[in-house]
Amino acid sequence: IVMTQSPVTLSVSPGEGAALSCRASQSISSNLAWYQQKPGQAPRLLIYGASTRAPGIPARFSGSGSGTEFTLTISSLQSEDFAVYYCQQYNNWPLTFGGGTKVEI
Amino acid sequence: QVQLQESGPGLVQPSQTLSLTCSVSGVSVRSGNFYWNWIRQPAGKGLEWIGRIYTSGSTYYNPSLMSRVTISMDTSKSQFSLLLASVTAADTAVYYCARDYGDYVYFDLWGRGTLVTVSS
């Protein structure tokens, strides 16, 4: 399954909201996760099951969607939120990731 | 506190075999609750899942790498390992080990990653 993320780069001012898109090439139900990756660090799990926040993840991160269209919404960007975000499907083997969206200031 | 730590050579010659180990602390790799994975990321690029292993020793690999990959586990040392044969420059990447819960394969815990460069 091919995962396509858009946009590739998103320029946002601190305090603004952001919506990141992830599209699957075929239906993956709600078997989608989102990760945040900062330079030089491993990815961090944000969302699983398309909409469930992982433990310790702030409420400003929310996920929605099912089937082939998914969205990660960050309600009010903080300085620590500027990073690259990846989606990953786990409905079919092999597991696949999107190409990422870079959220920059 | 559960931690994963990758280790192994940072430089591998073309056509040789890449060998990495992930040491797990704070939880037993024998735990039936978890699967243990390898994922890689070329510089400036996205993530590619390589494969996973369960405490029973059962494995599942990405078909794109299956012919060259072996993942094994040493429960006595709380470690699992990756072998990738016949490497080329395209295998240069940061390699991560990561944990998943099994039925729903998302990764809740990652190692810090280790850079492996394939070059003569």
Image: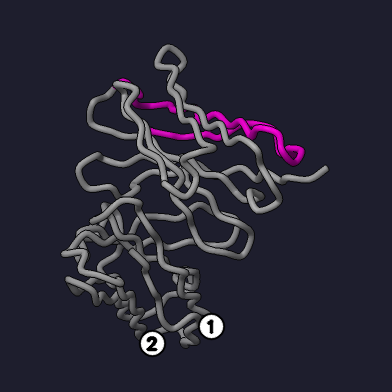
Residue B53: % across, % down: 36, 31
What is the basis of the colouring in this image? one colour
Q: In which quarter of the image is the N terminus of chain B?
A: top left
Residue A62: % across, % down: 25, 71
Q: Count residues near mark 1 (Cα–Cα under 10 Å), then give few for <14, some for 14-19, many for 20+.
A: few
In the picture, measured across the screen, residue B115 lies left or right of residue B51, that is right
Residue at disc 1, secondary structure: loop
User: Which mark, by number, is residue A16?
Assistant: 2
User: Which mark, by number, is residue A80?
Assistant: none
Q: Quadrant of the C terminus of chain B?
A: top right
The amino acid on which the numbered mark 1 sits, given as a three-letter code, is Ile
Q: Quadrant location of residue B61?
A: top left
Residue B69: % across, % down: 51, 36
Relative to A102, does residue B43 appear above or below in the rendering?
Answer: above
| Along the viewing direction, whichever of B78 and A23 lies nearer the viewer | A23
In the picture, measured across the screen, residue B4 lies left or right of residue B101, that is right
Q: Which residue lies at the image location 19% right of the left edge and 74% below the top edge?
A: A65
| Along the viewing direction, whichever of A22 and B13 lies nearer the viewer | B13
Q: Give the chain of mark 2.
A: A
| Along the viewing direction, whichever of B81 and B68 lies nearer the viewer | B68
The amino acid on which the numbered mark 2 sits, given as a three-letter code, is Glu
Q: Distance between the residues labelled 1 and 2?
A: 10 Å
Residue A33: % across, % down: 29, 60
Q: How many marks?
A: 2
Provide the residue designation for mark 1: A105
Q: Is residue B12 magenta?
A: yes
**What stretch of residues is rendered in magenta?**
B2-30
